[in-house]
Amino acid sequence: MILLSQELASDLEQAEIDYMIDRMTAVQERPGNPMGVEMRAFGGATAFYSKAMPWPQFNTVKGLSADEMDCLDDIIHFYKQRNGTGQFEIIPSKASGELLQALHDKGWYASGFHATLFSDTSSVLASLPASFAPEDIIEVRQLSGEDIDLYATLHCLGTGLPISGKHHVAENNIVLMERPGWHFYAAFVQGSPPAPP
């Protein structure tokens, strides 16, 4: 069992920031930047913006702590200049009363929660009975560019996006499938991809 420490929480947050920077950079590098992606660092925080992807996960600030309190007006202005709305993601170990009060004073409030899940899978695998053979039932395959339609379908169904937006998901993720460090996987149950509920 792994206990969450402040150091591990910071590492997990940094992994999310690194992931998001690379993802948004890949989308930004599409010819003409059709999604209108912009990113800006404010101290240890990074603000992400997309004109054509108005969903919160693409218009968010990650890495914010009390160290960036002097940047709050600049961050808010970054979004106002673009007629966008952002959100602040603050991990509990960085959520000081002073920072939360400063955000409240500027009209911001807690409106939801985001969880990052992690696990040491070695203990899970070690606890399975020797007779358990998941490979007979479930096969995990790495996807390639040829599988982008399947990926986009699963992405929409799994995140609640309308299937009508599948082509946008495909366009914004095909650039990641061939990007170094990125790997997409899907589980197949008895040879078939998961079916919608």
Image (spheres, rainbow, N blue to C red):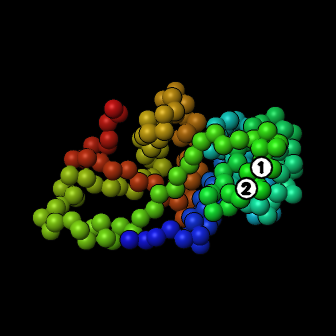
Q: Residue at x 66, y 43 (%)?
A: 110
- In which quadrant of the rendered view does residue 77 lie? top right
Q: Residues within 10 Å of mark 2 (few under 14, many from 20)?
A: few
Q: Is residue 53 left or right of residue 188?
A: right
Asked if labels 2 and 1 touch by Cβ distance under 8 angstroms, the answer is: yes
Image location (x, y in percent) of residue 136:
18, 56
Q: Is residue 75 left or right of residue 154?
A: right
In this view, 192 is above or below 92: above
In this view, 21 is above or below 193: below
- In which quadrant of the rendered view does residue 95 lie? bottom right
Q: Residue at x 75, y 41 (%)?
A: 108
The local secondary structure at tag 1 comes to: helix
- Label 1 sits on residue: 101
Amino acid found under the numbered disc labelled 1: Gln
Total marks shown come to 2
Badge number at residue 131: none
Q: Residue at x 87, y 57 (%)?
A: 70
Q: Quadrant of the C terminus?
A: top left
Image location (x, y in percent) of residue 156:
48, 36
Is residue 22 or residue 111 the one in the foreground?
111
Is residue 138 or residue 16 the one in the foreground?
16
Q: Residue at x 48, y 49 (%)?
A: 145
Image location (x, y in percent) of residue 97:
73, 55
Amino acid found under the numbered disc labelled 2: Gly
Q: Residues within 10 Å of mark 1 (few under 14, many from 20)?
A: some
Label 1 vs label 2: CA separation? Answer: 6 Å
> Residue extending furthest left?
131
In this view, 142 is above or below 127: above
Badge number at residue 97: 2
Image location (x, y in percent) of residue 171:
58, 41
